[in-house]
Image (tube, rainbow, N blue to C red):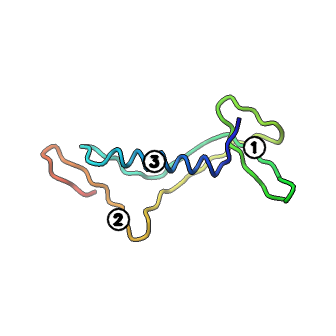
């Protein structure tokens, strides 16, 4: 079984957003920096000439085409105007901006 590369990235974004929200108010928070992914993909060209990339799930096999290893390095960016500072709480309860 396989999923579209764009669907995988959408799912990853959602998971990262959930993890950041879950960290709100915690004693220790982590800065989200570069995200690196390595996955197996196959591609196919549709009748209209559109190239589709499919990410293979664990144990998945491509029906046709060549399986390639794809390495993505994503750099998360805040919405325009949003501050990217990460707030941490010290053991004394003080809020520290990093």
Residue 91 appears at what percent x and percent y? Answer: 16, 43
Q: Residue at x 83, y 52 (%)?
A: 45
Relative to 13, does residue 58 appear above or below in the rendering? above
Q: Earlier in the sequence, mark 2 or mark 1?
A: 1
Q: What secondary structure is marked by label 3? A: helix
Which residue does the numbered mark 3 point to in the structure image?
16
- Quadrant (top left, top right, bottom left, bottom right) of the N terminus: top right
Horizontal side, residue 17 vs residue 40: left or right: left
Horizontal side, residue 6 vs residue 90: left or right: right
Which residue does the numbered mark 2 point to in the structure image?
83
Between marks 2 and 3, how big is the CA–CA gap? Answer: 17 Å
Which residue does the numbered mark 1 point to in the structure image?
42
Between marks 3 and 1, how big is the CA–CA gap? Answer: 25 Å
Quarter holding residue 67: top right
Horizontal side, residue 71 vs residue 81: left or right: right
Between marks 2 and 1, how big is the CA–CA gap? Answer: 38 Å
Q: Residue at x 43, y 70 (%)?
A: 80
């Amino acid at each position: 079984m396989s999923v579209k590369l764009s669907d995988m990235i959408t799912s990853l974004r959602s998971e990262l957003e959930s993890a950041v929200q879950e960290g709100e108010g915690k004693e220790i928070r982590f800065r989200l920096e570069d995200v690196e992914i390595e996955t197996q993909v196959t591609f196919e060209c549709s009748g209209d000439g559109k190239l589709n990339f499919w990410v293979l799930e664990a144990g998945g096999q491509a029906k046709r085409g060549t399986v390639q290893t794809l390495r993505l390095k994503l750099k998360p960016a805040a919405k325009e105007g949003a501050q990217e500072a990460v707030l941490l709480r010290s053991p004394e309860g003080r809020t520290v901006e990093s």
